[in-house]
Amino acid sequence: MKTNTTIILDFGGVLMKHDREECLRAFRRLMSDEDISAVLGLGNDLPGTLRVRLETGELSAEEFVGCVQKYCVRGTSGQQVIDAWNKMHAGIDDSTWESVRRLKDEGFRIYLLSNTDAIHWQHTLELYGKRIDECFDDVFLSFEYHMMKPDGKFYRIVNGKICSSPDRILFVDDSEANRRAAQETVGWRTCADLKELYECVRNGMGKGL
C-alpha cells in the first residue's frame, strides 16, 4: 500500500528510552556534581558544555573523552567515560521496532532526525544497526550536520533532502520546542509521541495529507 505521508522520528525519548538518573549515577563516581552540570552539560542544553559540543560535532568522540577525563578522578580510563555516557541508553522495546517496521511495510517513508553524538550513535549501531537499516530511508544526526534541533536551518536541510511536501510530513518529537520550531520553520505536522502518531495514522491522516 502506498501513502502520501512521510514520517520523521526523533530518537531519544521517542524510540530509545533514556535513563538520565543511571547516567548521572555513573558519572558521580567519576566527577563532581558541579562539573557534571557545568562542564559536561548532562541534563541541560547550555552552549559551550561538552555535551553540546559533542552533539554538534565540534568535538570528536576522542576529544570529548579526553576533555571529560580532565575533570574525573585520577586513573579514570577512556572506556569508563564511554561506558558512563552510554548509561543514558535504556533500550528500545521489540514492540516499538515492530510498530515502526509495520508502518514501513505499509508504504510510509520513514526518517530519523536526532540530536545525538558519535559515542551514542556507535552504541546504537552496535545494538540496533540491522533494524535501523531495515526501518529508515535515511538518518539525519546533529553531530554529522553540526547543528541541533530546534535550529530552523536543520529542519530546512532535512526538508530539502527528503523531497516531500511539508504538509505531508508527520514529525514525532517529545520536545515541545522542537515541534514548535518545525511547525514554524518548515510547516511540518507534529506529534508528541508514537501513540499520537499511531492515532493519526489510524484516523486516516496519514493517507490523505
Image (spheres, rainbow, N blue to C red):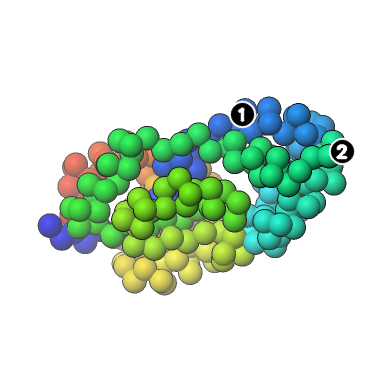
Residue in the image at 73% along x and 53% along y: 64
In this view, the residue in front, 42 or 179, is 42
Question: What amino acid type should be assigned to the residue bearing mark 2?
Answer: Arg
What's the distance in space between the residues labelled 1 and 2, CA to CA? 22 Å
Residue in the image at 78% along x and 46% along y: 68
Q: Mark 2 sits on what residue? A: 74
Quarter of the N terminus within the rendering: bottom left
Q: Toward which corner of the image does residue 74 lie, by quadrant?
A: top right
| Number of numbered discs | 2
In this view, the residue in front, 86 or 34, is 86
Q: Is residue 94 above or below residue 64?
A: above
Badge nearest the viewer, 1 or 2: 2
Residue 107 x, y percent position in the rendering: 20, 57
Label 1: few (<14), some or many (≥20) within 10 Å? some
Residue 46 x, y percent position in the rendering: 72, 47
Residue 126 in sight from this viewpoint: yes
Numbered circle sitting on residue 22:
1
Q: Residue furthest left?
A: 1
Residue 38 in sight from this viewpoint: no
- The answer to whether residue 114 is left or right of residue 49 is left
- The answer to whether residue 135 is left or right of residue 52 is left
Residue in the image at 72% along x and 34% along y: 27
Residue in the image at 75% along x and 29% along y: 28
Q: Toward which corner of the image does residue 92 lie, by quadrant?
A: top left
- The answer to whether residue 48 is left or right of residue 87 is right
Q: Toward which corner of the image does residue 194 lie, by quadrant?
A: top left
Residue 47 x, y percent position in the rendering: 73, 52
Q: Is residue 186 above or below residue 126?
A: below
Label 2: few (<14), some or many (≥20) within 10 Å? few
Tell which circle, 1 or 2, labels the residue nearer the N-terminal end: 1
